[in-house]
Image: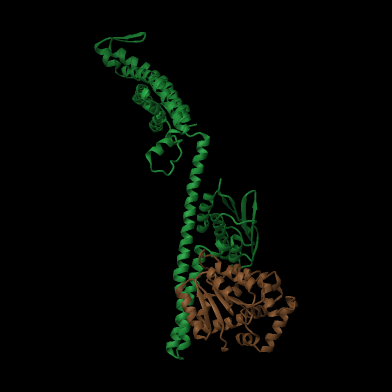
Chain colours: A green, B brown
């Protein structure tokens, strides 16, 4: 149900902008339709003329491209009747820079052929119909408006009536005008809304095209997650191969210096520097782990989750049954969910213990984190989880938090274990 | 420091650290027979002529994953007598457990920071060369923090856990006594209790077994 239909059943229809939108839609179809049929006939004529030399046949195969143009124009015009617009049924272009290939891709789309069909319907049938209805209706309305003035000097015949004076004209305007406006507005409103609906059916995406667009969207979001993952791994490697190694080198040098220096102020300072370098290394190790834990890459989700659990200040029981390694973005998402959840539990839950369970059922990875704390956790409160929800969303997964006051709090993550669908 | 000259093969892909390590070992009077930058070369030189000890980084070319560790495992199974000291940038027992498949020959797993404490590092190296087990205190702490309320360690008192942690680092009783500021007799008593509570009576070196049993669990 779009807003044009809703407007037609509303009591305020006559005083709204909708009658005028209908006029605008129907009348603008006249030049648009005329142009469409001219171009189509012109193109058909040219290809018929050229068909003996084969070029014409080639031109004929390009017709769906004209349909694409008609579709663009008509979807734009339909916004008069459908403020939400009609989304494009066309698939995303392949990443090819060559114009010829792009054109061929569009030409072969079923949506293009459909739009061409609409173009013929529009050019041959719809716009003359609209011209007739809207033209007559608008003319009658216009003449009725100026009837008192015309009748003042001349006599005019309006259907069964003949108006000869200004007052007769005015009476006609007052009595007939509202009736005509009401009747024509509803008539044209239905006509315009019907046509917009037709345009939507023919120029909008079909269900399979909608599904494909959704898949396109998901793929592009997955690409984003992937890029993010790659970038994290790159940063981790740079820190590891660069800064960490240098700091380790520094501690070695300082260690050797300690051995050589005699007891005294100089040695005390070197020992202090050594301690500081080690503290920096420990900090860096923590930071690197937060960016991308090496264990996750090398040993998989279970080992990485056990590491996080071991670092948690409260006892964490880990039960995971994962028969195989999962795709890297899924492992990473699950790891960061557990890591964030355990951090939150330690900080806010006042729990004495926590359980992490992970298993695979029906090609879904399910991970739950349950604590025996005070409950009442607010999903909107944790900014860390919000980012994870976005990530999971891109993977087609979900994150669910139940935390009644008094506990227990349970965070449940689900994600498909395969990305190749 | 015992004046024993060990022949050592060193595998570390960072030139900086390789030279730093080599110079530390050199000063201690050990022979750095080969210093290599990747796991394949490491295996090749060890197979050609086995050294006393192999010191290897976990992360190595070409994959920059755990190639060093896998090389260590290969050496372990082919040439069980060689002491292996693994240096890592991470506190991760996932790496450790794959090292502990076999208990013949010395094994060490240390954070790279530890190398800076030259005297301790060299002592660890000696213990590994002697067939002992050395696990980084940081890793041990993390492992001991795990599952305190269940598992085999539940029966141990906090003091016994402390003693076990120091045993895992490869310390002998006198060193543990010194560290904890108690008498050596007290340490012996604790160690006896640990063995009893962990039911260790399988004829192997029980000190090593005590640590390994737990680390594996």
Camera sees residue A47: no
Return the residue nearer the eye: B26 or B135: B26
Give the vertical position of B201 relative to A88 (above or below).
below
Residue under the image location 54 percent in, 52 percent down: A392
Q: Going by the picture, which residue comes out furthest to the bottom?
A: A263
Give the vertical position of B90 relative to B196 (above or below).
above
Percent position (x, y) of residue B115? 52, 79
Direction from residue A155 to residue B122 in the image, left or right: right
Give the vertical position of B38 relative to A407 (above or below).
below
How many numbered marks does the figure carry? Answer: 0
Direction from residue B152 to residue A286 in the image, left or right: left
- Quarter assignment of residue A123: top left
Q: Going by the picture, which residue comes out furthest to the left?
A: A153
Percent position (x, y) of residue B33? 52, 79
Residue under the image location 50 percent in, 42 percent down: A214
Give the vertical position of B1 relative to A54 (above or below).
below
- Image quarter where the C terminus of chain A lies is top right
Percent position (x, y) of residue A241? 46, 68
Camera sees residue A229: yes
Percent position (x, y) of residue A362? 65, 48
Return the residue nearer the eye: A399 or A94: A94
- Quarter assignment of residue B149: bottom right
């Amino acid at each position: 149900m779009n807003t044009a239909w809703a407007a037609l059943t509303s009591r305020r229809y006559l005083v709204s902008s909708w009658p005028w939108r209908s006029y605008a839609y129907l009348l603008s179809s006249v030049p648009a339709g005329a142009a469409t049929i001219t171009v189509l006939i012109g193109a058909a004529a040219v290809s018929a003329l050229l068909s003996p030399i084969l070029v014409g046949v080639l031109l004929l195969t390009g017709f769906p491209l004209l349909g694409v143009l008609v579709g663009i124009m008509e979807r734009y015009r339909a916004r008069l009747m459908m403020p939400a617009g009609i989304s494009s049924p066309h698939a995303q272009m392949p990443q090819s820079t060559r114009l010829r290939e792009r054109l061929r891709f569009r030409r072969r789309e079923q949506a293009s052929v459909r739009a061409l069909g609409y173009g013929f319907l529009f050019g041959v049938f719809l716009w003359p119909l609209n011209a007739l209805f809207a033209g007559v209706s608008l003319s009658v309305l216009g003449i009725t408006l100026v009837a008192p003035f015309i009748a003042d000097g001349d006599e005019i015949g309006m259907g069964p009536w003949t108006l000869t004076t200004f007052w007769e004209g005015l009476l006609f305007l007052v009595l007939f005008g509202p009736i005509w406006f009401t009747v024509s507005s509803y008539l044209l409103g239905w006509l315009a809304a019907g046509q917009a609906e037709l345009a939507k059916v023919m120029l909008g995406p079909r269900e399979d095209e909608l599904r494909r667009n959704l898949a396109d969207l998901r793929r592009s979001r997955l690409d984003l997650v992937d890029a993010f993952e790659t970038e994290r791994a790159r940063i981790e490697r740079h820190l590891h191969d660069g800064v960490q190694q240098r700091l380790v080198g520094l501690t070695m040098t300082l260690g050797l210096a300690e051995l050589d220096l005699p007891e005294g102020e100089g040695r005390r300072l070197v020992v202090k520097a050594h301690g500081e370098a080690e503290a920096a290394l420990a900090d860096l190790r923590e930071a690197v782990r937060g960016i991308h834990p090496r264990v996750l890459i090398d040993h998989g989700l279970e080992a990485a989750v056990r590491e996080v659990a071991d670092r948690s200040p409260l006892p964490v029981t880990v039960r995971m049954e994962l028969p195989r390694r999962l795709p890297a973005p899924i492992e990473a998402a699950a790891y960061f969910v557990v890591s964030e959840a355990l951090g939150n539990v330690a900080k806010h839950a006042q729990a004495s213990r926590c359980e992490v369970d992970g298993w695979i059922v029906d090609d879904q990875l399910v991970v739950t984190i349950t604590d025996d704390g005070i409950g009442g956790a607010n999903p909107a409160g944790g900014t860390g989880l919000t980012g994870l929800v976005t990530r999971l969303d891109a993977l087609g997964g979900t994150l669910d938090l139940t935390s009644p006051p008094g506990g227990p709090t349970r965070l449940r993550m689900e994600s498909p274990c395969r990305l190749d669908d | 420091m015992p004046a024993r000259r060990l022949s050592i093969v060193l595998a570390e892909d960072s030139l900086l650290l390789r030279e730093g390590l080599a110079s530390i070992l050199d000063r201690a009077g050990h022979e750095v027979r080969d210093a290599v930058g990747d796991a394949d070369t490491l295996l090749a030189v060890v197979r050609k002529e086995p050294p006393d000890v192999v010191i290897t980084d976990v992360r190595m070319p070409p994959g920059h994953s755990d190639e060093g560790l896998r090389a260590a495992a290969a050496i372990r199974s082919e040439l069980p007598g060689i002491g292996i000291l693994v240096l890592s940038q991470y506190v991760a027992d996932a790496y450790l457990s794959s090292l502990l498949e076999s208990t013949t020959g010395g094994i060490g797993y240390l954070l790279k920071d530890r190398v800076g404490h030259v005297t301790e590092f060299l002592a660890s190296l000696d213990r590994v060369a002697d067939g002992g087990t050395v696990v980084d205190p940081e890793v041990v702490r993390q492992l001991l923090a795990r599952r305190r309320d269940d598992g085999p360690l539940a029966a141990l008192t906090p003091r016994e856990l402390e003693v076990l942690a120091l045993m895992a680092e490869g310390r002998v009783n006198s060193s543990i006594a010194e560290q904890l500021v108690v008498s050596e007799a007290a340490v012996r008593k604790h160690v006896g209790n640990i063995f009893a509570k962990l039911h260790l009576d399988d004829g192997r070196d029980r000190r090593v077994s005590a640590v390994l049993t737990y680390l594996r669990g």
